[in-house]
Image (tube, rainbow, N blue to C red):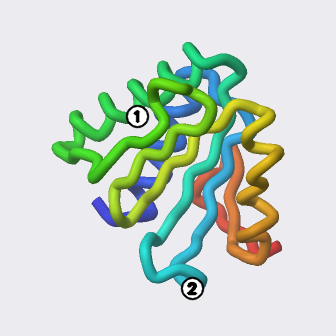
């Protein structure tokens, strides 16, 4: 599975747990450390953790393991690093504060339900 397909699958896994504002950013031309960001929002700590757990379960089904997971216990911003894909699961206030969409604003992006259709902003 290539990194784009993996990013799409992980975005779908987030959607299965009712994550909101799911965004895929293609950062291959902007970053040396990853190909795609998956960014989403959970409205509570338990929901953020459930989204993370579903992403982990999806990775296991694909025979993959994350390189690391940061922030799970606190549940405000969970980062799941798979190397080629990095998933960011935010609570709303943390997403607004860090505003990754703005920092990576010129990267091609795809939003639900057309995760595979990237557009340049």
Vertical placement of 56 versus 65: above or below?
Answer: above
Residue in view at x 65 percent, y 40 percent: 40
Residue in view at x 33 percent, y 65 percent: 2
Residue in view at x 23 percent, y 43 percent: 62
User: For the residues marked 1 and 2, what is the alpha-carbon distance in whole angstroms?
Assistant: 25 Å
What secondary structure is found at the residue carrying circle 1?
Answer: helix
Label number found at residue 29: 2
Name the residue nearer the viewer: 49 or 21: 49
Name the residue nearer the viewer: 82 or 113: 82
Name the residue nearer the viewer: 45 or 34: 45
Vertical placement of 72 versus 85: above or below?
Answer: above
**Residue found at the very far front of the displayed protein:** 74
Quarter of the figure with the N terminus? bottom left
Q: Residue 63: percent from the left, percent from the top?
A: 17, 43
Name the residue nearer the viewer: 69 or 51: 69
Horizontal side of 21 relative to 57 (left or right) equals: right
Vertical placement of 53 versus 82: above or below?
Answer: above
Quarter of the figure with the C terminus? bottom right
Quadrant in the picture for residue 52? top left
Label number found at residue 55: 1
How many numbered marks appear?
2
Please report whichever mark, 1 or 2, sits nearer to the chain's N-terminal start.
Answer: 2
What secondary structure is found at the residue carrying circle 2?
Answer: loop
**Residue found at the very far bottom of the displayed protein:** 29
């Amino acid at each position: 599975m290539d990194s784009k397909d993996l990013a799409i699958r992980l975005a779908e896994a987030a959607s299965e747990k009712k994550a909101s504002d799911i965004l895929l950013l293609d950062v291959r031309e902007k970053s040396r450390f990853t190909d795609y960001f998956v960014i989403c929002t959970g409205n509570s700590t338990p929901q953020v953790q459930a989204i993370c757990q579903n992403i982990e379960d999806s990775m296991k089904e694909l025979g993959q393991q994350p390189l690391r997971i940061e922030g799970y216990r606190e549940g405000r911003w969970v980062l799941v690093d798979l190397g080629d894909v990095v998933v960011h699961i935010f609570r709303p206030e943390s997403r607004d504060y860090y505003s990754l969409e703005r920092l990576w604003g010129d990267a091609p992006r795809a939003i639900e339900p057309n995760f595979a259709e990237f557009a340049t902003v």
